[in-house]
Amino acid sequence: MNTSAFENYESEVRSYCRHFPTVFKQSKGSYFIDENGKKYMDFFCGAGAANYGHNNPEIKAKLIEYLQNDGIIHALDMYTTAKREFIETLEEKVLKPRNLDYKIMFPGPTGTNANEAALKLARKVKKRQNVFALMGAFHGMTLGSLSLTTDKTSRKGAGVPLTNVTFIPAPYMFPELDTVAYMQRMIDDDHSGVEKPAALFIETIQAEGGIRVFDVEWLQRVRKFCDDNDILLVVDDVQVGCCRSGDFFSFERAGIVPDIVTMSKSIGGYGMPLAITLFKPELDIWTPGEHNGTFRGNQLAFVAAKAGIEYMLNNQIEENTKKKGELVREFVEKEILPLDTRLELRGKGLIWGIEFGNIPVSGLADKVEEKCFEYGLIIEGAGRKNSVVKLMPPLTISEEELTEGLHIIKQAVKDILSAL
Amino acid sequence: MNTSAFENYESEVRSYCRHFPTVFKQSKGSYFIDENGKKYMDFFCGAGAANYGHNNPEIKAKLIEYLQNDGIIHALDMYTTAKREFIETLEEKVLKPRNLDYKIMFPGPTGTNANEAALKLARKVKKRQNVFALMGAFHGMTLGSLSLTTDKTSRKGAGVPLTNVTFIPAPYMFPELDTVAYMQRMIDDDHSGVEKPAALFIETIQAEGGIRVFDVEWLQRVRKFCDDNDILLVVDDVQVGCCRSGDFFSFERAGIVPDIVTMSKSIGGYGMPLAITLFKPELDIWTPGEHNGTFRGNQLAFVAAKAGIEYMLNNQIEENTKKKGELVREFVEKEILPLDTRLELRGKGLIWGIEFGNIPVSGLADKVEEKCFEYGLIIEGAGRKNSVVKLMPPLTISEEELTEGLHIIKQAVKDILSAL
Amino acid sequence: MNTSAFENYESEVRSYCRHFPTVFKQSKGSYFIDENGKKYMDFFCGAGAANYGHNNPEIKAKLIEYLQNDGIIHALDMYTTAKREFIETLEEKVLKPRNLDYKIMFPGPTGTNANEAALKLARKVKKRQNVFALMGAFHGMTLGSLSLTTDKTSRKGAGVPLTNVTFIPAPYMFPELDTVAYMQRMIDDDHSGVEKPAALFIETIQAEGGIRVFDVEWLQRVRKFCDDNDILLVVDDVQVGCCRSGDFFSFERAGIVPDIVTMSKSIGGYGMPLAITLFKPELDIWTPGEHNGTFRGNQLAFVAAKAGIEYMLNNQIEENTKKKGELVREFVEKEILPLDTRLELRGKGLIWGIEFGNIPVSGLADKVEEKCFEYGLIIEGAGRKNSVVKLMPPLTISEEELTEGLHIIKQAVKDILSAL
Amino acid sequence: MNTSAFENYESEVRSYCRHFPTVFKQSKGSYFIDENGKKYMDFFCGAGAANYGHNNPEIKAKLIEYLQNDGIIHALDMYTTAKREFIETLEEKVLKPRNLDYKIMFPGPTGTNANEAALKLARKVKKRQNVFALMGAFHGMTLGSLSLTTDKTSRKGAGVPLTNVTFIPAPYMFPELDTVAYMQRMIDDDHSGVEKPAALFIETIQAEGGIRVFDVEWLQRVRKFCDDNDILLVVDDVQVGCCRSGDFFSFERAGIVPDIVTMSKSIGGYGMPLAITLFKPELDIWTPGEHNGTFRGNQLAFVAAKAGIEYMLNNQIEENTKKKGELVREFVEKEILPLDTRLELRGKGLIWGIEFGNIPVSGLADKVEEKCFEYGLIIEGAGRKNSVVKLMPPLTISEEELTEGLHIIKQAVKDILSAL
């Protein structure tokens, strides 16, 4: 394995390569292939960026054709045919059928860009500086998004105080506390010390926070809380959007309409950088260029994104994701949870977490993931103290592959628990 | 022209499309082609993202081959062959020949990401919170980079105070003031009110600030100032790197070595999102994952980036850029400046600005750009009150094309000035 | 009543004068006397600054003598005999008998100064920027103290974001929530988003927050929480110190020792500006002059402060305060609470609050206070939406006077409630 | 000398006591007397708090009478006869004769309080967050004022970043730079990075900055700059007001009217805590109690303050201060400057600085001050690296005493320079 170029020249900040120590060369469907030809099943999925499978052939064909035809690659935010087609597809096939009349903003091609834009817009619209975010949240690593992100190591990296955000306990943290009533009290109490926020940022399923699925009633109450108090509800669907939860938008199951939605990762269809910020038309008070970025018009990604949406619809990805989710749930409940009564399962659609945090031995989830890699499965952790094994296969995975992957996880858990 | 999708669905934040009102479909070399088949010469160059020409055929071939072979598209920061080849090429063909032993960091694929990473690293290394930046600077639009950016409209968009940055007058602003002595006084004076900074951020040529080329002696004195005072020198080469100034790195002409260098735009070779942050090995105190981002490993861009470097070397882009730069200078000095004695020319390599700000009529540069578009040339403005017409053709432009473009500009200037 | 000088020349920021519209000329014991000779019993007590009675004759005699002898009035922080005597008295008569070995700092003669100094010192000692404070707290109006203060109107006056403070729900706000466990979770959870604080600021009885007495067990758990987590416990005893609660220090009833204690108001003995910040000797890492202020050595106040301590001890003020407190409790419980079942009584020592907030009519407490003034009693409000009538007579009040005052309040409550 | 109480119990933050190691007991006119009966002439004057002489007998008589009559001591901001008389005196005898129609605010009895109030008010009126202050400035030590203060040691004590203030070079720092044009450029340049401020804070004579007297033309241009740009001009007259400069207000010599003026120190007449913030009536948009503080109505200080103003007028303090200032200038120019050509003299009225900073030996001014103390003269330093000996006797000093003090300084300078 020739990794000396990385070790000699790449910064120590590199991270996932340390967990998956080989050099990858190709990918296809649910698999990575390393330069020695060894195949690895992928239950990590680029942290949600490869929902429609690696190198999906239908999308690939369109990309090659576009390149061959000298389609525009870079155009900042000038009008292009590729962008128009993406916008029309998103509008006609995704937004309108869901009765969503969002305006589309291209804020730069990463999730953190989408959240920075949402943050600016919310403050501009409401003329307030404070913002609410939930404990357990991850919203990105640039200074604005980082102020919304809760992981302490990441925050410390800022090197300056992260300000103008108030963190609200997530509903699972203090079960006895009604978190919506808590927020209402922050607003109503003239001695709370907490300024009324421009917006509340949430993920409907906290992924990095440990696969924490917020229930429908809570989401509906949060929507009402925001309405009642003139606060914008921002849903960060970067990781759990694009059908990951079983619906295209993760908030659909609650029947709510956020004021702002941020998306990235799989919106690009083929793993290429793209991000969008969607918002209600009445919020569109931007002046031209007030937020910008060189790659906000990543044309190749527009082509893939359009193809991704079409693929998703033609292949009933939403419906199939729900079905496969049930398969995961059943397998883990029957085959893995019984291995130790302290294990917990949480999830929705095709994002699931097996919680090892109740077993008082540190690093268990890490060990399971390491063992999986030995057995040819790429899988990562999440959650507090990284105690959750996160199952996130491509949504295109076959049932056979899925079952095979689950068996590997079972074996890995068995190995690790039996060594305690 | 069918632009209703944009007008109905895209956010008002869109901006360049308002200056170039057509729908583009293809690009090739120095040209854009709109959907009606009309060709436009490109003197804007994606704000520096298309240095090696649009859809450069040598790079294109490699991209198509990579896609066809199911090369990996998305891999976060796992090891891949595409990344290894890019790192090796950058090391062997760019850094080593220049005696630079930088570590390479992939911070997310946009310039603002590269600057956010530089900002975090500088503060972490020096354990100081303040940072110096120059008036006239542009470093990005996410909250950390935005705190370094000087344009007031952009800053206002933050919606919160932008803190922990001290702005230093650029040397051209107060010619009587020695700006290096000014910075030294900020440090030495125990009553300056200014905290010693972790770093000084500069562009060696301020592009957005109005094509302001800092002279070699000033750059050398700045390097010495940073050395003498234990301050990191960060050069933002996002816009003027990748040979734009005539050298691969814009600071080469001064014979200085910055502590940190940020690059994006043309580093991706083909207009695809990529960014790198380079720094001296002793600064590499990151912990794994302390700064991250989903698209920090944009594999297709690695392929193009490697091919871009090779193309650049094989075609003597540096040398040719300098030559073509002389052509621009001579033409403008002989043909355009005489049109009005108040016009000024500033620039280096293939980034030039014609300053209209000394003529007391507002909006002249805008009008010249508009007129150029009528004549089939895409060109943009820069500088204070947008008073500078910025000439930034692809570095691959032929002398004939270049001359043709310059003639268009001349005609446009003539038209506008004669209408005064 | 000649108030035109105030109306014409004094700023609109003046406030209490609007509730007590007369011009006062003299004060004595429990009374104010206006320029028409009308006497008003004082149940407001300068918000706690006149604990030992107005113009206490024993203290007065010492002040006059000191002035007559040309004792030093102003000396910054030079050594003076007056300061030495105050320090020795505080040490020998207050601190040592309580086994407290605090260092004494003179931070400027106001409560807000004492809290600003505590804030600086805590951050300096712990090298952390965040600080915890409780919802409902009042700690002062200068920018640092204001960042710890919860009242929204006051906070808005800052005109800039108030940062680097995390507010913790007070224990009475969400009875179902264990607030100490909440704070522990903020520290332990690596995804809380909340930085570990340098200190926790509390009042043991929130006065402005609505006369909220924290119970002994909670105070003890808070002390343990701070010990366990290397966090400084700061008790702001500005309003409820100096025997107001029945003990000289309000925290004595819980048997705890804060790391830092701030005092002002009645520490000056005679209503003159003085403040002190007390802290454990190991925290005394100040460099000379690192915090200062012109009036940090208010010599006349030192004379009064020493005399005040002696008076307090000679007259068993602590013991008597507790006794009189029982008298208040009994009277209000028997005579006032029965007037409406929704009334609540809270308090300790000689600080009590009658809560009108459960009656859904706004402004009731204000009206009661206004009525009291008509009947010759000065009394003020506190709490959320100012819904609490705050009883805070001088500690030197006689039982007869106290009873008289309580009868006035009863009559006023009756009047107001009967008019509903 | 019994100083063990201080050494054992007082915080290390104590500072001036270290320079003047004795225990003072009395003061009278221009003298301090220690507990051994030794007299010290005072050229420090409580940093400007004892302009009308120590224990001025005319003021003293009024204080004793007030105490004997049980005048009110503490009344928050209720109406009192003492306050009314002070307001009327200030209006009739100080403001009206100067055609000033300021509203008077009592913000808490210290200079830092007065500046915190000015800062809040300026931001509230102009709805802007940034404020300009001058390098070399000292405005106080609480967090808001500290953000305006330039001394690095003090700033570091904040423990958090000090934000929302932009420092402007003082005119003496870069003689080649037109500082007013510099500020104008910050406003006009759309790429300065500097937000338009709510206010510009200045001292007309920087005391802590090193006795830097701003010339009349500069002050007038600053006033015009503020007018032209809708920025409030705030003059901090805490140290150099109350006739110190030769006029009651230090800005009178320039014929300008600031929008806001802050005063403390000698406004209290007798060295007792008092502060006022004056502002033009149209700025008085405070809501009642929006800024407050327990000791904002220090009644005894009102009595002294009124008596101080009367004393000042009856004794032609302004005129006499100018005369004595000439005496100082002549003496120092003739007798002290010739001792070393590198010495400089700066000052106005009765605030003068002898600059030792041009002699490349550190600590000279400190040594001169120490030597003066040996010779029975209390005098302090100021300025960059504390290189200035600051001459600030009571304004009531006799010419004989003044000459005596100057001779001591001359001898001390001689001693120290001859030992080089």
Image: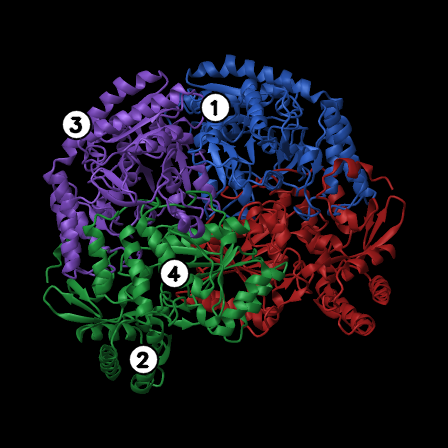
Chain colours: A red, B blue, C green, D purple
Name the residue located 59 percent from the left edge and 60 percent from the top edge: C229
Q: Chain of mark 3?
A: D
Image position of A351 with respect to D203: above or below: below
Q: Are discs 3 and 4 both within one chain? A: no
Q: Say what amino acid the circle numbered 4 marks.
A: Lys
Name the residue located 73 percent from the left edge and 70 percent from the top edge: A344
Q: CA distance from mark 3 to mark 1?
A: 40 Å
Task: Assess disc 1: are there few (<14), some (14-19) or many (≥20) residues with their C-alpha within 10 Å of its C-alpha.
Answer: some
Q: Of B29 and A158, which appears nearest the observer?
A: A158
- Residue C299 at x, y = what percent? 29, 51
Q: Mark 3, mark 1: which one is toward the viewer?
A: 3
Q: Chain of mark 2?
A: C
Task: Assess disc 3: are there few (<14), some (14-19) or many (≥20) residues with their C-alpha within 10 Å of its C-alpha.
Answer: some
Q: Say what amino acid the circle numbered 2 marks.
A: Val
Q: Which residue is mark 3?
A: D323
Location of the C terminus of chain D (image quadrant): top left
Q: CA distance from mark 4 to mark 2?
A: 31 Å
Determine the secondary structure under disc 2: helix
Q: Is residue A52 left or right of residue A292?
A: right
Determine the secondary structure under disc 1: helix
Name the residue located 43 percent from the left edge and 52 percent from the top edge: D9
Task: Assess disc 4: are there few (<14), some (14-19) or many (≥20) residues with their C-alpha within 10 Å of its C-alpha.
Answer: some
Place residue C210 in its image quadrant. bottom left
Q: Mark 4, mark 2: which one is toward the viewer?
A: 2
- Residue B65 at x, y = what percent? 81, 38
Image position of C367 with respect to A87: above or below: below
Q: Which residue is mark 4?
A: C152
